[in-house]
Image: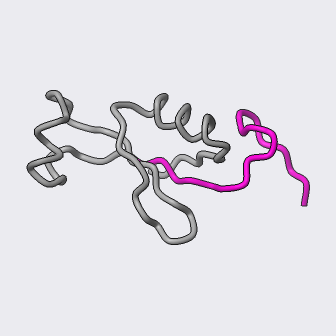
């Protein structure tokens, strides 16, 4: 299947899931670095579900994924 998806870099080899995370649900040491944000975004590996990164907003999460040749997919 050679489906092309808009916004996914050519040659992207890995899908990552992007989902919102409530800062209040994170450990205290992570909350301390959230800068007053209520929600941040996590990037998760599609194969094992491991959290790869936490970033301040959805746009940054998608940019980070694309810069690393990953295909970001939004998760609600």
**Number of numbered discs present?**
0
Residue at the location (40% across, 58% down)? 51
Residue at the location (63% across, 55% down)? 15
* Residue 20 in magenta stretch: no
Q: Residue furthest right?
A: 2
Residue 58 or residue 63, whichever sits in front: 63
Residue at the location (61% across, 34% down)? 67
Q: Does 29 appear above or below 50? A: above
**From the viewer's perspective, is 48 left or right of 42?**
right
Residue at the location (43% across, 54% down)? 52
In x, y percent, where is residue 65? 57, 41
Screen quadrant of the N terminus: bottom right
Residue 30 or residue 17, whichever sits in front: 30
* Residue 18 in magenta stretch: yes
Q: Residue furthest bottom?
A: 48
In x, y percent, where is residue 31? 14, 42
Q: Main secondary structure of the magenta part?
A: loop
Q: Quadrant of residue 4?
A: top right
Q: Does 50 appear above or below 75? A: below
Q: Quadrant of residue 35?
A: top left
In x, y percent, where is residue 16? 56, 53
In x, y percent, where is residue 6? 76, 35
Magenta span covers which residues?
Answer: 1-19
**From the viewer's perspective, is 41 left or right of 31?**
right
């Amino acid at each position: 299947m050679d489906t092309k998806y808009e916004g996914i870099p050519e040659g992207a080899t890995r899908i990552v899931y992007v989902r919102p995370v409530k800062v209040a649900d994170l450990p205290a040491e992570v909350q301390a670095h959230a800068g007053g944000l209520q929600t941040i975004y996590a990037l998760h590996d599609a194969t094992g579900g491991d959290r790869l990164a936490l970033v301040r907003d959805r746009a940054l999460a998608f940019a980070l994924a694309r810069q690393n040749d990953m295909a970001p997919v939004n998760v609600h």
